[in-house]
Structure formats: C-alpha cells, structure tokens
Image: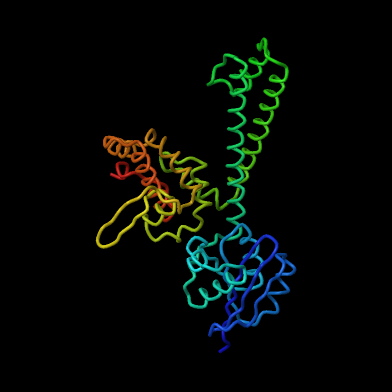
C-alpha cells in the first residue's frame, strides 16, 4: 500500500508556501509558488501521490480549493481562529505555517471547517453582494435626508423616498442652493439605480430551481420572508451539517460564550464566533415575527416581562432557528402545534 503524503499550504494573494511531509513527518519538499491557476496545476501534477492538502480559510481559499479538487486532490480547510499552533506560535513565517498545517493534517488534529459546494458559494456571493447594495441604498437615503436638514427644508419623512413626493418636493424648494438640488437629484438617481440592481439580483436567486423550492418551504414559517429564507439556505448550505438545534443556534451567534472551570460555569456576552450574516437577518426578523405568530408573541412577552428587550428578541430568534431547522430537515411546510390539533 502506497504511503500518504501530507501537504500544508499557506495561501496569500500572490504566493502559496507549501510543505510536503511523509507519514513519519519527514519533510520531502517545501518552497513557494505563485498563486496562479496554471502554476498551481503544474505544481500539483509533480507532487508524490497519493497526497492530501490542508490550508486555512481565507479570501483566496475558494478558487484554490476548487482548482485542486477538480484535479482529484483531497483538500481540507482549517478554521483560522482555531489553529492554535499558528496563532500562539512565538516564531511565525509562511514556511513555518505551512509546516504546521502539514503536521496538524498528518496527526489528524486539523480543526476542519465545512466548505459549501461551489454552486452554493456562487449563489451566496450574489446574496452578500445584494446585502451590500441594500446597505449603500440606505446610506444614500440618509444622505438625502441630511442634505434637506442642512438646508432647513421641511419634509415628510415617511414619504421622502417615494418618487412622486420627492419630485414634487424638488419643484417646491425655495432658497436652496443649486448645488444642493443637484446633489439631491444625483442621490435619488443613485438610489433608483442601486434598488434596480438589488431587485435584479433577488429575482435571479429566486429563479434557481432547487433554491426556489427550499425558499418556498421556509417561507411557510410565520415571520420568515424571502430574504430570511434565502439567507438561511445559502449561509447554512446542506442542513445535515447540524446534528442539533443547539449547534444551529451557536452557528447563528444567538447564544453567549460559555466558560466552565472547577465546577463553576459563567456566561459571557453573545459570542463573536458566528455567522454574522445569519445573525443580523435573524435578529431583524425576530423583531417583526411576533406580529405574525401568536406563539412567538407569547415567547416575546414572557421574556419581556423579565425586563430585557434584547433577551426577548434573542428568544424569538432562537425559536425561529428551531423552526427553520425542522422545516429544512422534514422538507414539509410548517404546521403550528395549534393547527395540528
């Protein structure tokens, strides 16, 4: 039986440092190559077979992982915050990091993370770009309001971003510098353009056949809309990754950090080790979900009576995670307990 070789890859924007070790930990080869697809292919073909690679999750991991796996290589991705041997090292360099990754892989101590399939990663990239567009649109709307306030213009805040009211407001402006009017027009054009792009991306995501079916099922949950369902489907990926509701809640960043020692347990603030995109969407959904579900409203009021608004919102968000996980697993529409009876 051929011996296995273990390759550690320390990836950067322009270069990739590598270290090849055999089963005994002897360094067979190490060096540095350019981070280019053609260079990577030629380098991978000359490696001793069979081999297995490991690298940390970074901005550049996706294309390297796809490129190597397409050639039949077995590649694992490590959680950068959990590779303690690299974080806590007194001496650190690209070559040492590559050696450390190879050693962790060889000893089966690599803190591996799950990388979504390539198709889902592409769809997730589109969704996150859509979130960026929404953020920029909000900034431009706030800028419009700021320009009007700076000029002492009285306006109706609730109607400000409606097209008809905005154009009517521009025509009625008096004593406002021409530069402000021009900036208002430019800002409005930017809002319309960004909003059009956002709608185009959202429609494109919903036309994906498998994604559309999954989103429709998730939307059967009270308080779960298109964006919440899309974010859950594309940020979570295959639902089999979660063995329990607690794991899903932890991944979404809806629980506090736990510290236990000598029989004493302490709870800290909400953990920063989470999927920030899911956390943001679920918290925002939890603020509105009680309006659509009496059961969620009861959960909110029960926690609210303890005097903490944030605790009540988190309790609703955690229940939404339980609903999303159940619907995703069963592949059936949501049915409340009261309806089932």
Quick one: which residue is furthest to the right in this view?
38
Q: Nearer the viewer, residue 136 or 194?
A: 136
Quarter in which the C terminus is drawn? top left
Q: Nearer the viewer, residue 229 or 28?
A: 28
Res 273 → quadrant: bottom left
Q: Nearer the viewer, residue 267 or 160?
A: 267
Residue 191 left/right relative to 212 = right
Type of colouring? rainbow
Residue 173: percent from left, percent from top: 66, 12
Q: Residue at x 62, y 24 (%)?
A: 144
Res 220 → quadrant: top left
Q: In the rendered image of this protein, does residue 259 appear above or below residue 18?
A: above
Residue 211: percent from left, percent from top: 55, 51
Q: Residue at x 52, y 42 (%)?
A: 227
Quick one: which residue is furthest to the left in this view?
263
Quick one: which residue is furthest to the front in this view?
90
Q: Residue at x 58, y 46 (%)?
A: 128
Q: Nearer the viewer, residue 243 or 276?
A: 276
Residue 266 left/right relative to 243 = left
Q: In the rendered image of this protein, does residue 282 appear above or below residue 56?
A: above
Q: In the rendered image of this protein, does residue 304 appear above or below residue 158?
A: below
């Amino acid at each position: 039986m051929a011996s296995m070789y273990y390759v550690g890859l320390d990836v950067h924007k322009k270069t990739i440092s590598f270290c090849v070790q055999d089963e005994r930990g002897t360094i067979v080869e190490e060096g540095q190559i350019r981070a280019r697809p053609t260079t990577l292919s030629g380098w991978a073909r000359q490696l001793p077979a069979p081999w297995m690679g490991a690298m940390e999750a970074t901005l550049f991991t996706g294309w390297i992982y796809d490129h190597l796996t397409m050639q039949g290589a077995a590649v694992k991705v490590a959680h950068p915050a959990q590779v303690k041997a690299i974080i806590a090292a007194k001496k650190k360099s690209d070559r040492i990091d590559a050696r450390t990754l190879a050693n962790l892989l060889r000893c089966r101590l690599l803190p591996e993370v799950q990388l979504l399939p390539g198709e889902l990663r592409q769809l997730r990239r589109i969704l996150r770009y859509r979130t960026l567009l929404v953020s920029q649109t909000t900034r431009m709307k706030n800028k419009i309001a700021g320009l009007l306030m700076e000029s002492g213009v009285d306006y109706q805040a609730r109607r400000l971003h409606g097209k008809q009211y905005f154009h009517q407001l521009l025509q009625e402006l008096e004593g406002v510098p021409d530069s402000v009017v021009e900036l208002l027009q430019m800002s409005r054009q930017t809002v319309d353009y960004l909003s059009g792009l956002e709608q185009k991306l959202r429609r494109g995501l919903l036309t994906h056949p498998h994604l559309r079916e999954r989103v429709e099922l998730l939307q059967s949950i009270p308080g779960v809309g298109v964006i919440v369902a899309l974010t859950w489907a594309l940020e979570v990926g295959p639902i089999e990754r979660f063995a329990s509701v607690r794991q899903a809640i932890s991944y979404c960043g809806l629980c506090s950090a736990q510290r236990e020692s000598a029989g004493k347990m302490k709870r800290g603030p909400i953990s920063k080790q989470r999927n920030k995109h899911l956390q943001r969407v679920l918290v925002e959904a939890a603020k509105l979900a009680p309006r659509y579900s009496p059961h969620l409203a009861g959960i909110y009021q029960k926690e609210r009576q303890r005097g903490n608004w944030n605790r009540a919102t988190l309790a609703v968000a955690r229940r939404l995670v339980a609903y999303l996980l159940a619907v995703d697993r069963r592949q059936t529409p949501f049915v409340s307990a009261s309806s089932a009876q």
